[in-house]
Image: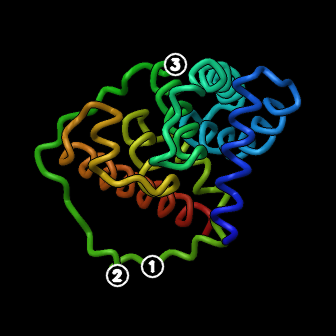
Amino acid sequence: MINQKQNIETTELIKQCLKNKPWAQRKLYDQYAQAMFNSLVRMSGNKEIAKDVLQESFIKVFKNLGQFKSNSTLGAWIKKICINTMITELGKPKFQSLEEVDLLDESEVKIDFTKEVEAIHHAIKELPKGSRMVLNLFLLEGMSHEEIAQILQISVSTSKSQYHRAKKILREKLQTERNEAG
């Protein structure tokens, strides 16, 4: 029942936005802007770039709102526009060719992430652009490797390799920081 009510509210909000009602556009922007901004900061590692891309993305959202089809949620549709705009802004990431990725069993490495959130954010910002984008899209945005491959126009295996590469780099950086602090 709640979902149906939300769908009706969203449909009405879209109709009002398409009529160029400023209050409706503002409501739509306010409803999604912060979440999209957070995603864009994670992707770019830069708040100023994220602000610019957010504004550009919402211009595209309002320009193309008539093309929105309700086979996905409005939030997912807006997020896709934001991600594609960020990819355009940053340029398509260049992915390093990896002969073989040394995969570690997740259970082999135990890290208490709650104490190291700041270090993790810093380490993510320092990742190579391609690995950072894949890590963010997979881990933080919840996209599948198939979706990432399609968006970034890479193979699924490249997406998986970049994700594992990013995790390996993060482990090494965090281990180095722990060793230096301890």
Q: Amino acid at mark 3?
A: Glu
Direction from residue 68 to residue 130 in the image, left or right? left
Query: In the image, what residue occupies the spot 45% across and 42% down?
Result: 132
Q: Amino acid at mark 2?
A: Ser
Viewer-nearest residue: 57 or 92: 57
Q: Which mark is residue 8?
A: none
Query: How packed is label 1: few (under 14 Cα within 10 Å), some, or many (20 or more)?
Result: few
Q: Secondary structure at mark 1?
A: loop
**Residue that label 3 marks:** 89
Q: List x then y, in percent, for residue 29.
A: 76, 35
Quadrant of the rendered image containing residue 34: top right
Query: In the image, what residue occupies the spot 39% across and 44% down?
Result: 134
The answer for how far apart the CA atoms under marks 2 and 1 are is 7 Å
Q: Secondary structure at mark 3?
A: helix
The answer for how far apart the CA atoms under marks 1 and 3 are is 36 Å
- Asked whether residue 49 appears in the rendered view, the answer is no
Q: List x then y, in percent, for residue 43.
A: 54, 38
Q: Are marks 2 and 1 in contact (CB under 8 Å)?
A: yes
Q: Is residue 182 above or below residue 83?
A: below
Mark 2 or 3, closer to the camera: 3
Direction from residue 107 to residue 5 in the image, left or right? right
Of callouts 2 and 3, which one flags the residue occurring earlier in the amino acid sequence?
3
Q: Is residue 129 above or below residue 131?
A: above
Q: Amino acid at mark 1?
A: Lys
The answer for how far apart the CA atoms under marks 2 and 3 are is 37 Å
**Residue that label 1 marks:** 110
Which quadrant of the rendered structure holds the N terminus? bottom right
Q: Which mark is residue 107?
A: 2
Mark 1 or 3, closer to the camera: 3
